[in-house]
Amino acid sequence: MADIEFGLDTFGDIPQTDTGELASHAQAIRHVVAEAVLADQLGIEVFAVGEHHRPEYAISSPETVLAGIATQTERIRLSSGVTVLSSDDPVRVFQRFATVDALSNGRAEVILGRGSFTESFPLFGYDMNDYDTLFEEKIELFSRLLTEQPVSWSGTTRAALHDADVFPKTESGHLSTWVGVGGSPQSVVRTAQYGFPLMLAIIGGSPERFAPYTDLYRRAAEQFGSAAHPIGMHSPGFIARTDDEAKEIFFPHYKVMHDRIGALRGWPPVTRAEFENEVAHGSMYVGSPETVARRMASAIATLGAGRFDLIYSAGTTPMSDRMRAVELYGTEVVPLVRDILA
Amino acid sequence: MHSLTDPQQATIGILGAGKVGTVLARLAIAAGYRVLIASSRPPAAIELTIDVLAHGAEATTATDAAGQADLVILALPLGKAVPLDGHQALPLDELRGKIVIDAMNYWWEVDGVRPDLTGDDVTTSELVAAALPGSRLVKAFNHMGYHDLDEGSRLAGDSDRKAIALSGDDVAANDVVADLIDSLGFDSVDLGPLGEGAVLQPGRQLFGANLTAAEIRDVVEQAAA
């Protein structure tokens, strides 16, 4: 099996401090930077931060956090997860990530997505009714900006560009760009159409269920004559010394977050039985290093994935427990998964 | 007589080729039905998706799918079936007189902010029924998450078999839909008229339910108590 890349992903959830209080947004951001520095030291390949505009999450400006991480790290790639392109300006997204790329000596990466929360739309003056059009137009413009040549473009969602040259240029001439998809077949096909690598957000149910999506991606790429890259997957999880310890620490914090976000979408509160089922058979990688490694290896093999990003923070999980999960991921889980898949 | 739910005889039309539409198409193909599926885009634009995700289903136009089908399932964005601007995306003439299954829910990601679809006093299926004059509307398949639908199909009698709750004002149509649900691998629980389907909607007791028929009945009883 080809080399698998391993990443960590966070939305900057507001954690508890070691005295049990909620951290401030500023503390939460500094904690993410510290986790990224540790991840870099442990040789983890990618660190991704996702954009949200809600009180539970401190990261609304991923590339600013990545810039902070960039100057304190050596090897780790710095990614968004995701950048909500629909409610952003493709020109600015390119500029900001090209800047992170400069600060990090070529380690910046964008994962574009449509977003799965409403907040960014009114905040930046976009109409939810244009959800599809906004993404369609902006991904097209972004793909042209990636050529790093002057761009002429017109559409309905931003001002037209006439031979516009955008700076800074990257040193490699190529800003690494993925598209994050949650399960919409049309989004999978569109990702293949542009030749972008596909990051599947698999946050519930068995990973096997997504195998047809990887087929769809490959066949669509074939049809469009674009490159089919190894797919990535990102899923939530948490690691502690034992299975019981991991579940006991994680569940209460996860439940508060799940139920609060779920209520906005009409979901019922999550039960312990549902959680246990998801941990045993679904897409939550929670447990001891060995348990998590076995389940990750199985999912990676099933989907033929080339990259696995673990969303390691959920809700108010305390800072020190999160830091230890990062450490166990780098020191034990990743080497074990590599062994299993070797 | 031509049976509406005999997989050897009946054709299922599915309007919507997203997550739910492709899962239902896959289940219906597995059950042996002829399946026609359409989206808002031209058939050629979804051909590959259908070939991979619901191999054996035929991609076509909404008008053709609705016209040929014995049963039609609506799995498109709710806002398109109950449009604010009066621009009806559904082929009303072809749907008239037919049993139409409403698997849709209000979802801001695709429908935008629509207070008219989130009121407490009327179910979205009643709004859909009003928008489809002459159709025999049954609400079903809306409460179960699409990945549970995808993984949950079981033979009748399996102790782990889950149930789909349905509601509709036309008792005979409800019975036909119950047969369809059975052939797709689920038990069914008929809640009665469309208004009773409120309990199936986002934010209500059975939204997201991946339960057996007995468990669904328990929840309904508790909700009524």
Image (tube, grey):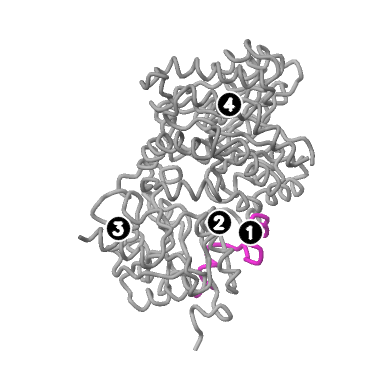
N-term-proximal mark, 1 vs 2:
2
Q: Residue at x 42, y 66 (%)?
A: B163
In the picture of the structure, the residue carrying the numbered disc 2 is: B17
**Label 1: chain letter:** B
Residue topped by disc 4: A326
Distance from the alpha carbon under mark 3 to that under mark 4: 44 Å
Magenta-colored span: B47-70
Amino acid carrying label 3: it is Ala
Q: Is residue A196 visible?
A: no
Seen in the picture, residue B50 relative to B184 is either above or below; the reply is above
Q: Chain of mark 2?
A: B
Q: Which element carries disc 2, helix, strand or loop?
A: loop
Vertical order, B7 against A231 (above or below) = below
Res. A151 image quadrant: top right
Q: The N terminus of chain A is located in which quarter?
A: top right
Q: Nearer the viewer, mark 3 or mark 1?
A: 3
The Cα atoms of the two marked residues, 1 and 2, are separated by 8 Å
Q: Quadrant of residue A226?
A: top right
Kindly check if marks 1 and 2 are in contact, taking CB atoms under 8 A apart as contact.
Answer: yes
Which residue has dot 3 on it? B198
Identity of the amino acid at label 2? Ala
Image marks 3 and 1: residues in contact by CB distance under 8 Å = no
Of A165 and A105, nearer the camera is A105
